[in-house]
Image (tube, rainbow, N blue to C red):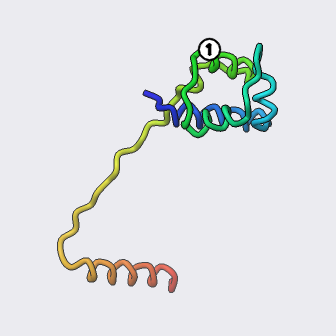
Amino acid sequence: MASKMDVGLNVQNIRKKRGLKQKELAKKINPTPISVNTLSRIETGRSNYSIDLLFRIAEVLKCDVSDFFQVEEKHPLKITIVEGDPKDLIKKMVREEILKFSK
């Protein structure tokens, strides 16, 4: 599920792809323009918004409102457990890197 931050970042990314500045987009929203501050707060996930406002923004950006709710699949963190002294592991990794550059 998309968070307010996800929605805001998607609005921002689409706006930038369309070559619009926040001020330009804010003015074009019909029937009542919104403030640049409001748009900024939406894009940074710091503001609540109505679905009606998202439809109005999508209309100006010529996209589907569902585009705002797309979430990239997050990859789980991979953890490798290594036995032994961490200092020895670091020394080994440094030696391997040095060997790569000396070839």
Q: Residue at x 76, y 21 (%)?
A: 29
103 up-or-down from 2: above or below: below
Q: Residue at x 47, y 79 (%)?
A: 100
- x, y percent for residue 65: 61, 19
- x, y percent for residue 28: 80, 23
- x, y percent for residue 62: 73, 20
Judge left or right: residue 86 versus residue 14. left
103 up-or-down from 26: above or below: below
Q: Name the residue under label 1.
A: 52
Q: Quadrant of residue 76?
A: top left
Judge left or right: residue 7 versus residue 99. right
Q: Nearer the viewer, residue 19 or 85?
A: 19
Judge left or right: residue 35 versus residue 52. right
Q: Residue at x 52, y 36 (%)?
A: 5
Amino acid residing under circle 1: Asp
15 up-or-down from 91: above or below: above
